[in-house]
Amino acid sequence: MSTVYLVGAGPGDPGMLTLKAKEVIETCDVMIYDYLANADFLHWCKEDCEVLYVGKKGGDHTLPQDKINELIIEKARTGKSVCRLKGGDPYVFGRGGEEAEELVEAGIDFEVVPGITAGVAAPAYAGIPVTHRDHTTSVCFITGHEDPTKEKSGHDWSVYGQSNSTLVFYMGVKNLPMIAENLMKHGRAADTPVALVRWGTRCNQTSMVSTLENVAEDAKARGFKAPSIIVVGGVCSLHDKLGWFEKKPLLGKGVVVTRAREQASGLVKIMRDLGACVYEFPTIAIEPVDNDAEIEEHLLQLGRWDWLVFTSVNGVKHFWNRLEEIGLDSRMLGGIEVAAIGPATADALRERGIIADFVPEKYVAEHVVDGLLKLGVQGKNVLIPRARVAREVLPEELAKAGCNVKVLPVYETRLAEESGETIEEAMALGKINYVTFTSSSTVENFFELVRPETVKGCPEVKIASIGPITASTLSGFGFEADVQPQDYTIPGLVGAILDDA
């Protein structure tokens, strides 16, 4: 049976989406979403999900509400599961109630998945609790933009003006002078604190505090526009004391992450936690290689190898995938010594029950060779599961030391099917501060998708390289790394960006 889910996407921070909402997004057949619903959530949709944008921005409707209602019903009648994703909560100034009424009339089953509303979340991220026993015991949510076709206003300004409640106005920036004037006219003191929070909970959040008497003029001077929440009341005086989100060290900094999508989550999360505006731009797609017979042959004869050397998390992942496909497990590595280049690779092995015998202090091939030679690898049989195309320094140097070396390709990388247009546009608008590169492949593929002259024309864009090998590849395109850590790891790269910022 088809069901329509009226889903609240929350105020914008991806971490504030509910588990129920994520479940619906991951399983729906049709996604119908709004302007204020974070587009990052669309990455969770199924590959065959039909994605339709129906939002409005500044009064510019992609589809008017009656047409949205018709579209929801039309898609539901095809027997598909429909997710109607709306910013905030669908029943708090989200017109979800109207859509629900239309569904009832059409005889279509629906469910409501509440979301965290911006009227609570945005003030909280700006250090403003909407209730506080020293200031107020109630809060009132008010639309700052009424339906212009209504015969009679729903506002009772005398109640708002004389109440001690915190007043939270949605969609009211254009009407801010009128709101302030009416509140003062009906009893609110001119020096009542007022706060504006724009893009609340997102990486580009900004906030300000003024008074009823001055807020319209101050907001205009500071260029505050929609979407902004307006908060009126004594609780706004806590903004400077309790504000926490806007203190994040990378708040508002645009950071491009070029790693493959399956690898990027760790770096993306760290950057977002630090306040950065992350542009996920996977330049690499990772796929298993098509050499099943060769891989199976070597997996069945693992006992002939003295050392297994894993150079990446992907090598571990695809090695184990093939191992499990033929009904084998970690017991096949009994008696074999294992090396891991980098702590992340060592962690991937640990998750599979293997503690690496050797992890070099520096995570480049030359240091791995030195460390292995000190452990007596000379003359031993060494198997290196890795990408089809990679630097040959490690196998060549081990071979020179008398090792019997076999490179076993278990995965390959290719150019991701991405368009560089979005990144180039963001650079032109000055929205990007750092582009991160974690391998030579990310560099080469990035400049297949984004023109080097575009980057060179944006002097505010800094290049962050994870290490010297990647930096060397950058030099081939005419760039020097502006940021490079001493420790060639993701945490090291993040730390170097923090130091630079």
Image: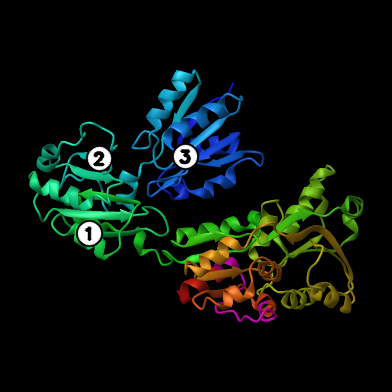
Q: Quadrant of residue 387?
A: bottom right
Q: Is residue 126 visible?
A: no
What span is in magenta? 474-492
Q: Is residue 188 left or right of residue 152?
A: left
Q: Is residue 336 left or right of residue 472?
A: right
Give SS at disc 3: loop
Residue hosting label 1: 209
Q: Amino acid at mark 1?
A: Val
Q: Quadrant of residue 446?
A: bottom right
Q: Amino acid at mark 3?
A: Leu
Tell me which label, 3 or 1, sits earlier in the chain: 3
Q: Amino acid at mark 2?
A: Ile
Residue hosting label 3: 63
Where residue 378 is drawn, which disc sits there? none
Dot in front, 3 or 1 = 3
Instruction: Check if residue 452 falls in the magenta segment.
Output: no
- Tell me what residue is drawn at x 15 percent, y 54 percent: 212
